[in-house]
Amino acid sequence: MESIARRILTDSKQNMNIGWKDVSTYMPPMTNGSPCSRSEQPSACKMVAKETINGRPTTKWELLNQHGEHVYLWTDDEAEIAVRWQIENVTYEATDVRAVAVPEGLFEPPAGYTLISGHPSVVK
């Protein structure tokens, strides 16, 4: 599985690689700045507004998920990443989005953590 993220389990001092399928609800794939072509229901995806969030230009999208729920997604126009998600009455937001150089080893697990395998929702 291609690893794009890492889940750190602090209680057990374990870590696991997470693939795209596990995080795509929160970080949908973008094509030319749009999440529509790779959304769960592409025909129901549409751009609804241009807004500024935390001083950055964004595009607001309306999508339907696999359960038929309306999902609103704001994508940063420059970074082409999701910076705010609203699913039903819950809102998630990424803050302090900026382009910076990433130091070597930044995404390595802390010393003493064991790499495990499994699906993030079932590993405790």
Image (cartoon, rainbow, N blue to C red):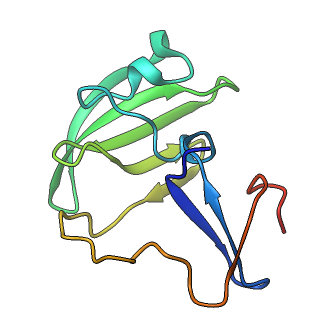
Which image quarter holds the N terminus?
A: top right
The residue lying toward the viewer, choosing from 89 and 9, is 9
Q: In the figure, 20 relative to 115: above or below? A: above
User: Which residue is pictured at 39% across the width and 77% down the height?
Assistant: 105
The residue lying toward the viewer, choosing from 6 and 33, is 6
Q: Position of residue 43 (x, y in %)?
A: 46, 9
Q: Left of 93 or right of it: where is 116? A: right
The residue lying toward the viewer, choosing from 21 and 64, is 21
The residue lying toward the viewer, choosing from 45 and 17, is 17
Q: Left of 55 or right of it: where is 109? A: right
Q: Position of residue 101 (x, y in %)?
A: 19, 70
Please identify the residue farthest to the top as the structure is shown: 43
Q: Position of residue 11 (x, y in %)?
A: 77, 85
Q: In the figure, 53 relative to 66: above or below? A: below
Q: In the figure, 29 relative to 112: above or below? A: above
User: Which residue is pictured at 84% across the width and 69% down the height?
Assistant: 124
Q: Position of residue 45 (x, y in %)?
A: 43, 19
> Which of the 4 image quadrants contains residue 107?
bottom left
Q: Left of 94 or right of it: where is 122? A: right
